[in-house]
Image (tube, helix red, strand yellow):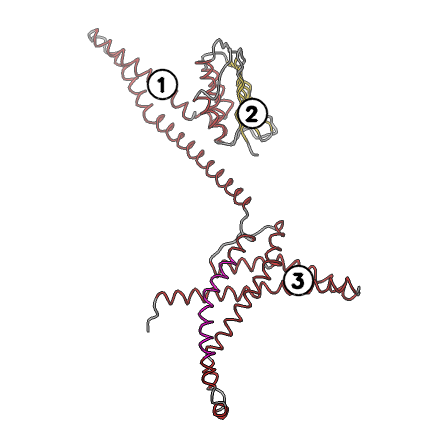
Amino acid sequence: MTVPTRLRRALVRMRRDIAFIGVGVTLHLIPALLHFWVVILLLGTAFDPDPETTVVLAFSLPLLIVAGWGLTEPQRWRFRALCGVELPRLRFRELRRQFGYTLLIGPLLGVLEFLLLALLLAAVVASLVLVWVWLVPAEWRREYGGYTTNATYLTVAGLLALATVPPLAAGLVRLEILAGQGLLGVSRSDQLARRVEDLTESRAGAVDAADAERRRIERDLHDGAQQRLVSLALNLGLAKATLTDLPPEAREVIDAAHREAKDAIEELNNLVRGLHPAVLDELGLDAALSGLAARAPLPVRLRVDLPPGLPQRAAPAVEAVAYFVVSEALTNIAKHARKATRADVTVTRLGEILRVVIADDGVGGADPSKGSGLKGLAQRVRSVDGTFRMSSPVGGPTMMNVELPCPM
């Protein structure tokens, strides 16, 4: 005989609910009985101080505390194994929530579970009363001839009570899940903290992935397109030097192509350095910034102060952000800082903070809210949890202060 799918699911669900409730009776009523016992001892000690009662109370109180804290793990197993609800493992400092569930809410749920199991037992017994009647001696049945009517009433009542058990059990299980998640689950503050951690990790992963992609593009350009352009420039240079019998028009074309090739190589070099300079990975931030200062169109005074007692290298993502902040700042000074004659770049390691200060002697007046370049710098600094501050009063000077975290 094939059991219908819906009936089979209902039976499986009911068996799961009854098992969940049956296990919960024990876990809920044990601390309830201990709680009641301790209250009785406290009242007895208050009205009739007795050394023996005091000794028993001294042992019962620690037992109650251990039960309130130690029964949390069996509750987690019950929710996970029987209902598929995963509750976090609470830390010891969250005893208040554990005691609230085990010693206050738990006993109330235990009473409801006990009543439901008693109803189930009574319903099963009542629904089988006709079977029990046939187990008694025949003389009793002949003596009480009206037992059939009463047994039928009891059987019907038992079947009706039995029909109410599944929805009541399902409702009680849902109530327990809500109570368990409310007290033993993750609190709102913990959820926010974990969400912040997840977002921080995902953002760090995105920053690392973007940095790795820039490194790949820089490597591909350096090893591919740049080498081809260098080869082209060499061939054009050889053509200029060896093909001396060409018409003037052809030599002019070769000269123009040679100049264009050298200009393209220079632009590609700048592009590669802008993506991710190889010297930053090989020699570190000091050497990379020295190269920036040497190529800047105005004098740059660079000072990199990395104390010997601290790590000399920061995380690659942090070094990349510091490098590009200085690079973009020097470019902005050269293009937009009116009457600027020099720039100062100071990089200092202060414990777990890498501070970068860029200043110029221009007339000031820069507004970070109006320039997309400055907004991009601020966003890039915030991508590694850094802080970006800028001061540019009218008349100057302009100062950019960037602090980047450098965990040891």
Where does the N terminus fall, quadrant-wise? bottom left
Bounds of the magenta segment? 153-176
* Left or right: residue 149 compared with residue 75: left
User: Disc 3 or disc 2, which is closer to the eye?
Assistant: 3
- What's the amino acid at mark 1? Glu
Q: Vertically, is 199 above or below 227?
A: below
Question: In which quadrant of the rendered view does residue 55 lie?
Answer: bottom right
Q: CA distance from mark 2 to mark 1?
A: 31 Å
Query: Where does label 3 land, which residue?
Result: 35
Label 1 sits on a secondary structure element that is: helix
Q: Are marks 3 and 2 in contact (CB under 8 Å)?
A: no
Query: Where does label 2 land, which residue?
Result: 355
- What's the amino acid at mark 3? His
Disc 1 crowd rating (10 Å Cα; few below 14, some 14-19, many 20+) is few
Q: Position of residue 153 (x, y in %)?
A: 46, 79
Question: In which quadrant of the rendered view does residue 216 lie?
Answer: top left
Query: Where does label 1 land, which residue?
Result: 267
Label 3 sits on a secondary structure element that is: helix
Sequence-wise, the earlier of marks 2 and 1 is 1
* Left or right: residue 231 compared with residue 381: left
Q: Residue at x 47, y 24 (%)?
A: 377
The image's mark for residue 225 is none
